[in-house]
Image (cartoon, rainbow, N blue to C red):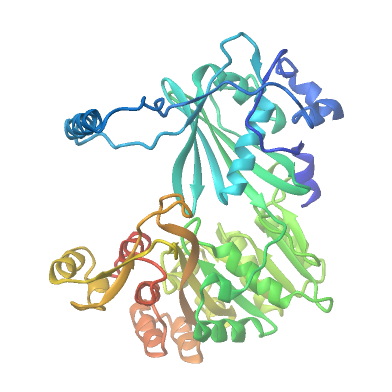
């Protein structure tokens, strides 16, 4: 963690993941923002070894019905079935979730323990983001697990202001501002591990919404095999990063695993013989021996200015979190041209679109051709749960349905092919999926493609040459995953797009 990040975050030390408890007295919620700079309020964000009473937690699940005779039970089941049939079609059935409300006896709910409880549960569920969303009558807490948002908790509306106040104080935000977006950071210490969270608050019509991005840096192992990359693609990537200079780009939408792929390369290259420096926003992982720089716009430490400073630090390998503008793109390509290995990410839909995207950012075509080694386009798909995935055989009706939706996928299957679909069990939380893996599209810049880029040839012609050289599309990688039972057809259709 860089010094910049540490200065802009409070440290929260949590020792237990227990449900928050009501306190006899308010939990320091009357502190002013200036008081949070002192060490005592900082430590007060979590109460260690507390033995308070059990919280008032209401479950939205109805109480268990009394014992009935079989005849009565059958009647009740018939009534429930009829009630279910009378539900409007536009009403989505929601799973019963836990509700936490203010104690009825007038005591104060421990807001600090509530926040810690939410974060602890998010970590257990391998959550990437926590959404705290205000509604008209309740505040809903949702976790993004494997790329999908799930409702996990409800908080009473009367707790909303106290919850927001505590988060703002801990993240060093203005507590008197309710109509403008704010950003901050909070550091939690859970089971002796530092958990940095990036906090974003946005005003909505029902109140201020909070999104907490969890940045779990320790204990990460980055290998292309664990990411799901095939052996053939790994050889192409390995050849590109073994060159002493040039540029390696990971492309795709937000949340497609680009940073993780770049870190897998950094981990391979990391040794005491080289100087590796990164400039990121945020610093998502930490590798021992790598110099991580956190972007800080308030201090005028941007990707471009940070990259300029890195070049004066005698680097061998540079990683730029993202190329967002023409200035950063030009500095990066010039760095790759002058003997540095540069890794970065870019937002494009596929590998081939990276070339015109760089040219649109005022990078000369001859510079793109001279510096670009490889482009790794990718998506993240959910893995089927091995304990409950269900085997199905594609019949004519199913094949016709797939053809209408995605002809490019349907052409790879025929009637009688065996595939798998999600079922749902206790192990996977009834989702049918456990974890995610990468779908990759690797564009290797060969000498012929370099010449075509320099001569500004049509990008469609460049794509044809890349396909002739064996470039596999993301959707084709997904089809292989379906055939091996790694994921489902519906999941591949969800995460991939039709190639026009």
Q: Looking at the picture, tell me which residue is in the foreground, 196 or 434.
A: 434
Q: Looking at the picture, tell me which residue is in the foreground, 220 or 241.
A: 220
Which quadrant of the figure has residue 79?
Answer: top left
In the rendered image, residue 357, in percent from the top left (x then y), is placed at 46, 66
Which quadrant of the figure has residue 458?
Answer: bottom left
* Residue that protrudes farthest toward the right in the picture: 39
Residue placed at 27% from the left, 29% from the top?
Answer: 69
Q: Is residue 168 visible?
A: no
* Residue that protrudes farthest toward the top in the picture: 106
Asked if residue 422 lies left or right of residue 156, the reply is left
Q: Is residue 390 visible?
A: yes
In the rendered image, residue 406, in percent from the top left (x then y), is placed at 24, 67
Residue placed at 58% from the left, 15% from the top?
Answer: 103
Is 239 placed above or below 81 here? below
Is 309 placed above or below 232 here? above
- Quarter occupied by the C terminus: bottom left
In the rendered image, residue 348, in percent from the top left (x then y), is placed at 45, 64
Asked if residue 40 lies left or right of residue 194, the reply is right
Which quadrant of the figure has residue 422?
Answer: bottom left
């Amino acid at each position: 963690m860089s010094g910049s990040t540490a200065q802009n975050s409070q440290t929260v030390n949590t020792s237990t993941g227990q449900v928050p408890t009501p306190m006899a007295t308010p939990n320091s919620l009357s502190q002013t923002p200036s008081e949070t700079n002192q060490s005592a309020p900082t430590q007060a964000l979590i109460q260690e070894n507390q033995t308070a009473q059990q919280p008032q937690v209401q479950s939205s699940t109805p109480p268990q019905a009394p014992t009935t005779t079989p005849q009565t039970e059958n009647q009740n089941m018939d009534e429930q079935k009829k009630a279910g049939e009378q539900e409007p079609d536009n009403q989505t059935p929601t799973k019963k979730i836990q509700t936490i409300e203010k104690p009825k006896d007038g005591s104060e709910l421990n807001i600090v323990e509530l926040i810690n409880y939410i974060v602890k549960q998010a970590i257990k569920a391998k959550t990437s983001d926590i959404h705290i969303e205000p509604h008209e009558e309740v505040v809903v807490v949702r976790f993004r697990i494997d790329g999908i948002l799930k409702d996990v908790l409800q908080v009473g509306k009367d707790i909303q202001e106290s919850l927001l106040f505590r988060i703002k104080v801990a993240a060093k935000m203005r507590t008197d501002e309710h109509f403008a977006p704010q950003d901050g950071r909070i550091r939690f210490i859970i089971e002796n591990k530092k958990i940095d969270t990036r906090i974003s608050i946005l005003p909505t019509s029902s109140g201020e919404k909070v999104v907490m991005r969890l940045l779990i840096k320790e204990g990460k192992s980055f290998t292309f095999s664990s990411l799901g990359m095939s052996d053939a693609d790994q050889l192409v990537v390995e050849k590109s990063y073994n060159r002493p200079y040039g540029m390696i780009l990971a492309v795709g939408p937000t949340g497609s695993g680009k940073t993780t792929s770049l870190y897998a390369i950094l981990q391979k290259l990391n040794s005491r013989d080289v100087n590796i420096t990164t400039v990121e926003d945020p610093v998502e992982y930490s590798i021992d021996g790598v110099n991580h720089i956190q972007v800080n716009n308030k201090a005028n430490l941007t990707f471009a200015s940070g990259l300029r400073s890195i070049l004066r630090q005698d680097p061998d390998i540079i990683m730029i979190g993202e190329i967002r503008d023409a200035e950063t793109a030009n500095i990066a390509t010039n760095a790759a041209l002058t003997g540095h290995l540069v890794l970065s990410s870019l937002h494009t839909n596929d590998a081939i679109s990276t070339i015109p995207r760089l040219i649109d950012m005022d990078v000369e075509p001859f510079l793109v051709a001279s510096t670009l080694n490889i482009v790794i386009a990718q998506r993240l798909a959910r893995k089927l749960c091995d304990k409950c995935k269900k085997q199905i055989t594609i019949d004519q009706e199913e094949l016709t349905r797939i053809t209408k939706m995605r002809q490019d996928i349907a052409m790879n299957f025929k009637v009688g092919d065996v595939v798998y679909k999600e079922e749902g069990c206790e192990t996977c939380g009834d989702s049918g999926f456990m974890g995610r893996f990468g779908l990759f599209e690797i564009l290797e810049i060969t000498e012929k493609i370099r010449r075509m880029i320099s001569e500004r040839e049509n990008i469609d012609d460049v794509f044809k040459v890349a396909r002739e050289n064996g470039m596999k599309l993301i959707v084709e990688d997904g089809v292989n995953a379906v055939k091996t039972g790694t994921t489902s057809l519906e999941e591949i259709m969800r995460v991939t797009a039709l190639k026009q």
